[in-house]
Amino acid sequence: MSRDDGAATTTGIARLHDSPGLAGPDRFALVTNHTGVLPDLRPAAPALLAAGAPLVALFGPEHGLHGTGQAGESEAARSDPDTGLPVYDTYRCAGERLDKLLIDSGADTLVYDLQDIGARFYTYVWTMFDLMVSAARTGRRFVVADRPNPLGGRVAEGPLLDPAWASFVGRVPVPVRHGLTAGELARYFNASAVAQAAGRPVELTVIEATGWRRAPVAEAPGPPWIAPSPNIPTPATALVYPGTCLFEGTNLSEGRGTTQPFEIVGAPYLDGRFAPALAGLGLPGVHFRDLRYVPAFHKHAGLPLRGVQLHVTDHEAFAPVRTAVAMLAVLRRLYPDDFAWHPPGGGAEDTGHRYFVDLLWGSDRLRRAVDAGEDPLPLCDPPAPPGRWAGEDVLLYPADLASSPEGRSPR
């Protein structure tokens, strides 16, 4: 998601390494994982310690500090062998338990440095939200060492989450494809949701990424790509993920257990009708290729599946959420006796009595529309471009106005 034309982006963590005072004078804990690296790809935590920063603890998200855990997993390590620092696992930890972790860490400030990918249901930003709430409750400062949005940051897609459907794949009203950086999301959270949850906002600082702008996906400068989790291996995966992640809520394989997760979907019952039906929709910026595959793990492991691969031909025209929703409607129409939603309960996310697709979508409107045979595409319309749905005052980075399409500039 970055270009190679000499444009330099300096991430917030790189700026903090060069100027440790940006996080304040107090002892701090670093909320990070394997994506938390400097421009030369050195891990930030040992580099910060070597630079004399008062770093006293590490906090890891879903997938763990080193990114080895699969979906719904973290890591069991209690200390980091590279730094000797204690490691606190935040995954599935909130409320008083999370407050206790902050207190036990001995840190006065939390510094957050995780690479988000721009989709509401990617859990790193909800780790950030929960930690902001705990920091506010326990009187600690919160610093976001910001990173670019790898989807360009100019486009929002999909509805705001309905608070009645809040979960760890969406705590507060945010579109499916939100168009913000983690630092901008933190400013949005702090303006209302953190104060509501904790009784007061957190003392927040964002160390901005310099040299980044809102631009077309293929042109937005950014740091080298590091897979932020095991099933987002490439920028191409990140581009389709805001849409095809919805297949986690169905009985189709979303490609986990293959080398192209989220770029391919399939099931034992699909046949030669599926790819031509999708091609007939004329969806912009994408071609569908009929394929067969056998997942090594996860859904339908070891079974021969038929499905499609999404080949994105135009990054700017491609709308991942609308594309996936159109695919769901075709599945219901072509395979009414076989296509099904993943039932409530169980799985990586404890859904209780709720369908997981409803938690991903942020309400039950998509599932109900597809089941009723209604056109679900109007549900994909965003509330507004990024600068309008979140509020202009949360934005930190300008748009590349020379290349912004009409009506899509956040400014």
Image: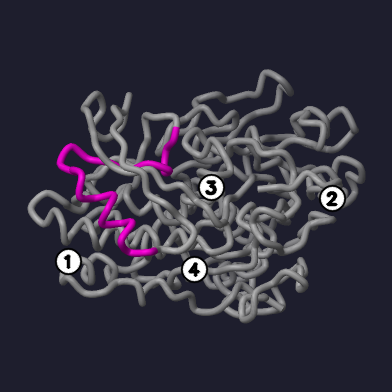
Label number found at residue 157: 4
Foreground tag (1 vs 2): 2
Label 2 crowd (10 A; few <14 / some 14-19 / many >=20): few
Residue at image point 48% right, 41% down: 91
Q: Is residue 189 magenta?
A: no
**Mark 3 residue type:** Ala
Mark 2 residue type: Ala
Q: How would you rate the neighbour count of disc 3 (Cα within 10 Å): few for under 14, some for 14-19, many for 20 or more?
A: many
Quick one: 329 or 140, which is closer to the camera? 329
N-terminal label among 1 and 4 = 4
Colouring scheme, one of rainbow, by chain, secondary structure, one colour: one colour
Q: CA distance from mark 2 to mark 3?
A: 21 Å
| Kind of residue indicated by mark 4 | Glu
N-term-proximal mark, 2 vs 4: 2
Badge 3 is on which residue? Answer: 238
Which of the 4 image quarters holds residue 227?
A: top right
Residue on which the image places disc 1? 371
Image quadrant in which you'd find residue 356: bottom left
- Label 3, secondary structure: give it: helix
